[in-house]
Amino acid sequence: MENITDYLCKYKDYVFAIGVTTAEYIDSLQNFEIRDSDVFVVTYPKSGTVWTQQIVTLICESDFEDSGLYPNNLERMPWLEYREGRPDYSLRASPRLFASHLTPVLMPPGLRDRRAKVIYVMRNPKDNVVSYYHFCLAWAALETPKSFDEFLQHFLSGQVGAASWFDHVRAWYSRREQYNILFLTYEDMIMDLHTAVRKICHFLERDLDEAAINRIVEKATFKNMKTDPKANYEFLPEDMLNREKSTFLRKGTIGDWKNTFTVAQSEMFDCVYQERMGDLPLKFIWEMNGQPL
Ligand code: A3P
């Protein structure tokens, strides 16, 4: 791994926070044995990972023979790429759930057998970068941005953890035929959480009745997750995440970017977005009901 700043290192065109993993471990994922029943939630950071983690964990809850073994969603659905301190995943009971921010080339090749399931959640990149900016203000392992403008430049050039948003979304979307993959957007989930949960159930082949779906929706609302100690990541130590600066559940809305971007930054971003993503048929919702927030 090559250090590119005091906080970030690069490996195979991907960017990690220094110290979270090793090249050997990432390479070992090429031999990671995938089970047909595995479920992966894959995202670019700050796209709604923790939210989807909660939904998928609740949907699969009745399948777990080892219920109660894991104190929170992070333990139940660990990050694939952060090996440190984790048990041997080959010893885990099925179904195994994993979260990941990796790009397809770094993922276990067995996923391309199209049996294990991948849920890819993406978010409009203006809200994504604002959420990421606030996260960096609070997350000790990442450099504290001097200003939003500086962070925006780093985001656009891919000099942030998980590298470029544009490359990440493109890489997963353009290889979608190779995977058993469900694409969802954060905005779909905000606009109609019930439909999103139902879609995820259907994809995971879990036939839950309406009452069970309603219970999951209730437990996955922003308000309820914020006070759910299994889901809200408040269990992380204070020296890792400074809660006075930000939290995993911060605003939970669409269009917060308008409170941060200047008009000039927004226009510049639109040009870059058009240049880099204009050929893809992706449609994001950029603001609530078209109304300024
Ligand atoms: P904001 O910072 O815009 O509030 P990730 O889990 O990938 O780190 O993403 C974090 C973002 O998802 C944060 O966005 C957080 O508030 C939002 N989020 C998490 N749970 C949510 C929920 N139940 N409803 C809406 N947004 C949620």
Image (spheres, rainbow, N blue to C red):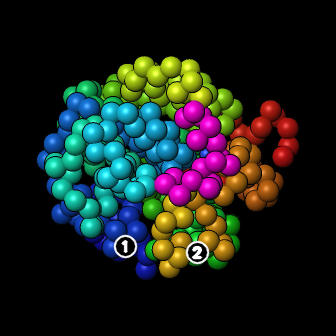
63, 42: nearer the viewer: 63
Segment tinted magenta in the rendering: 215-231
Is residue 260 shown left or right of residue 73? right
- Few, some or many residues within 10 Å of mark 2 (<14, 14–19, 20+): some
Residue at 48 percent of width and 74 percent of height: 237
Is residue 171 placed above or below 128 in the rendered structure? above
Q: Is residue 226 magenta?
A: yes
Is residue 284 shown left or right of residue 43? right
The earlier-in-sequence mark between 2 and 1 is 1
Furthest-right residue in this view: 292
Is residue 177 placed above or below 70 in the rendered structure? above
Is residue 172 placed above or below 158 in the rendered structure? above
Residue 140 screen position, x and y as percent: 50, 76
Mark 1 residue's CB less than 8 Å from ligand 1: no
**Is any atom of residue 150 visible in this view?**
no
Q: Which mark is residue 18?
A: 1
Residue at 66 percent of width and 74 percent of height: 244
Q: How many marks?
A: 2
**Element under label 1?**
loop
Q: Which mark is residue 242?
A: 2
Residue 116 screen position, x and y as percent: 28, 31
